[in-house]
Every structure is written in C-alpha cells, then in structure tokens.
Image: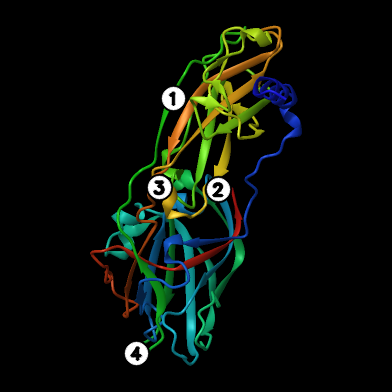
C-alpha cells in the first residue's frame, strides 16, 4: 500500500472519532519532585528530627495534575540508609489548602504562605515507623476525608503542626534540592480550515506542563458546537512518510483544509461547553526522561462538521510544542518551636520528597 493510500485510509478511519479513547487516565500516586528518584539530594529535620514544631511545604499544582485532584493520603520517606528507631508524637495535625505563592516564592513566615481557609485532614497521635536500610514511602498520613484540590485556587500547601517540646533525634525526612528550569514553549503553524458557521476558534497548548513528567496538551476553544473531534500527534510537520507537509485535502473533498502533522498518534478530543462557546483538550503524557528536554512534538485537531464541506472535515492549525526543563516543584520551611511565627528556609529551594495518593486529572 502506498503512503498516500495509507494516509487516506487512516483519515477515513479516524473521522468517527467517538470510537477513540483518551490516553491520559487518572493515576493513583504522584511523586514530587520527580527528579529525586530513589533518593533525594538533601534532608530535613522538620518535624521528624524534633519532638515538636511546625513544617510547611508548597507543591506547585502543575507538578501533579492538569486541573484538579482528589487527594486521600500524603506519604513521606525517611532519609539515609541507616536503621532508625520509631518516634512517637502525642499529636500531629496536618492541614491542606491553597498556597499564597508558588514554591519558588515561599516565605519564611508561616502565615504568609497560607491563602484562605486551610482544611485539617489529619489530627491524632502519630508514630513515625522504624526504618531499616530501605526507604519506602511508609510515613503515611491518611486523610479523614478526601480533599478536592483545584489548580485555579492556587498551589498546594501542606502544613504539619506538632505542639510539644522539642527533643532531637536522628530521624530525618528525605528531601531534594531544586534549581530553576526552563519553560516549555509552543507556537502555531500552518493554516486552519473554516467552518460553515464561521467559528472563531483556535488551538493552543499549556507551556507550564511541557516538561518531563508533565504532559503535552492540545487545547481547542472558541467553537460554536460540540463537534466530534480528534487530535493528531506527529513527530514531524514537514513530512508524513514520503508525503510533504502541509498536505492539501482538496482532493479528499475538504477544500481549504490541510494535514499539517504526521499522524503518529491519534485520540479523542472531547469538547464541552465553555460559556457561550465550546472547547476541550487532549493530553499526551511526557515520561520523566531528562533527555526529552528540547524535543518537539506537533499536534492538530480534526473536527467533524458535514455542513462545512463535502467530506465534513475541518482541520485546525498545527501546534508545535517544545519540552522545557522542570524547575522548582516544591519548597519547604520549618521550625522546632511550634509557636514560632517564622521558620528556616534554604536559599536553594528544597522540598520533602512527597508521594500524593488520590485521583489526578
């Protein structure tokens, strides 16, 4: 079969996009920061190294979800490889809420990091488990009720409050230092087809998610109807096999439309009401592989509208997305005195290596 015939066959199959499912299901755990791997580069004594105190952590929402999350547990791990005995506390209170800034802008003043009401999700006596030479996420704080996190409200703030006198020990939490990264970028290219209803639509991406461990997103907006739609993803915007791009679809009875990307992947682009118009997004997960920094991927939307041309296809502009480097995902401040208004914060941002458990969207 020739490449041209192969492309036509794919397009004909792809048109009824309702049969294709998204490739980005919810996940059960998210580790932040991902760069910490199996062992972070630093450690923290707050609150584990003292018999009391206060500790806060800001986690950027982009580090664990695209829009919302239902959080059920927070898990930490101990630092080092030596055996450590258990530690017991008469009371540990964990509250969760919105942060007043992102992780890079965290303040040494505890009150300055809180935005609005914070929700208490754990308040009880607690024992840090004894540790052997391995370091699993076995320091578990199970929420009394799930917490609904929404990115538009701000980044995530975790706060541990341990109201008792300090007594030092060698029990430290694993942490990881971070450096500022480079933002991912996107740009449009090529031309988009026209709807019979003259929709003022467009396609973009979310540069904040374009990093290892994040996602490449194709975002459509400004559509007059919830058209059946599909997203095409390709590694090239100049060639599809032996076919030069853009490829004019006039011979396929879709005049004014062009294929702008090679079709290496295709999946659904569900559209929903957004005020007086419709829009939606499709997302392609980016593995946490540092070598992907600087790599590009291209995407394009196909909308099905029989009124617009004999074939019933309207293809958008293309979007080229360039993957950036993840930067400061989380930051941490603490003090051994639970009544202190300020805490110790490092000039180089570092955060507790944290595993969030729940549902992430």
Where's residue 310, x and y in %? Answer: 71, 7
Which quadrant of the figure has residue 145?
Answer: bottom right
**Which mark is in front, 2 or 1?**
1
Q: Earlier in the sequence, mark 3 or mark 1?
A: 1
- Of residues 225 and 194, the one drawn nearer to the viewer in this rendering: 194
Helix, strand, or loop for circle 1?
strand
Q: Earlier in the sequence, mark 4 or mark 1?
A: 4
For residue 329, side relative to residue 229 (left or right) = left
- Of residues 284 and 204, the one drawn nearer to the viewer in this rendering: 284
Q: CA distance from mark 2 to mark 3?
A: 26 Å
| Residue bearing the label numbered 1 | 188
Q: Earlier in the sequence, mark 2 or mark 1?
A: 2
Q: Residue at x 49, y 48 (%)?
A: 214
| Residue bearing the label numbered 3 | 293
In this view, 166 is above or below 38? below
Q: CA distance from mark 2 to mark 1?
A: 27 Å
Q: Residue at x 36, y 87 (%)?
A: 165
- How is this picture coloured? rainbow
**Which mark is in front, 2 or 3?**
3
Q: Earlier in the sequence, mark 2 or mark 3?
A: 2
Helix, strand, or loop for circle 4?
loop
Q: CA distance from mark 4 to mark 1?
A: 56 Å
Residue 168 marker: 4
**Which mark is in front, 4 or 3?**
3
Helix, strand, or loop for circle 2?
strand
Q: Earlier in the sequence, mark 4 or mark 2?
A: 2
Residue 68 marker: 2
């Amino acid at each position: 079969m020739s490449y041209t015939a192969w492309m036509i066959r794919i397009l004909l199959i792809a048109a009824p996009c309702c049969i294709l499912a998204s490739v980005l299901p919810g996940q059960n755990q998210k580790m932040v920061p991902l760069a910490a791997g199996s062992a972070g580069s630093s450690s923290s004594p707050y609150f584990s190294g003292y018999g009391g105190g206060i500790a806060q952590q800001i986690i950027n929402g982009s580090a664990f979800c695209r829009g919302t999350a239902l959080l059920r547990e927070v898990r930490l791990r101990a630092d080092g490889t030596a055996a450590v005995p258990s530690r017991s506390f008469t009371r540990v209170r964990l509250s969760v809420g919105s942060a007043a800034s992102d992780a890079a802008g965290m303040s040494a003043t505890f009150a300055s990091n809180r935005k609005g009401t914070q929700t208490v999700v754990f308040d009880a006596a607690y024992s840090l488990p004894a540790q052997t030479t391995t370091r699993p996420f076995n320091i578990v704080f199970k929420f009394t009720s799930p917490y609904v996190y929404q990115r538009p409200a701000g980044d995530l703030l975790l706060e541990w409050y341990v109201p008792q006198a300090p007594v030092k020990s060698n029990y430290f939490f694993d942490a990881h230092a971070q450096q500022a990264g480079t933002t991912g970028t996107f740009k449009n290219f090529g031309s988009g087809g026209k709807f019979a209803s003259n929709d003022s639509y467009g396609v973009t991406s979310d540069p904040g998610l374009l990093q290892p461990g994040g996602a490449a997103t194709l975002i459509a907006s400004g559509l007059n109807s919830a058209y059946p739609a599909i997203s095409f993803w390709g590694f090239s915007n100049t060639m599809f096999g032996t076919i030069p791009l853009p490829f004019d679809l006039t011979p396929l009875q879709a005049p004014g439309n062009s294929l702008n990307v090679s079709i290496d992947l295709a999946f659904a682009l569900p559209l929903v009401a957004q005020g007086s118009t419709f829009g939606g997004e499709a997302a392609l997960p980016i593995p946490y592989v540092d070598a992907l920094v600087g790599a590009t991927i291209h995407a394009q939307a196909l909308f099905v509208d029989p009124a617009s041309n004999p074939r019933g296809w309207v293809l958008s502009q293309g979007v080229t997305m360039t993957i950036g480097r993840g930067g400061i995902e989380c930051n941490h401040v603490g003090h051994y005195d639970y009544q202190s208004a300020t805490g110790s914060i490092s000039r180089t941002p570092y955060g507790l290596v944290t595993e969030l458990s729940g549902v992430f969207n």
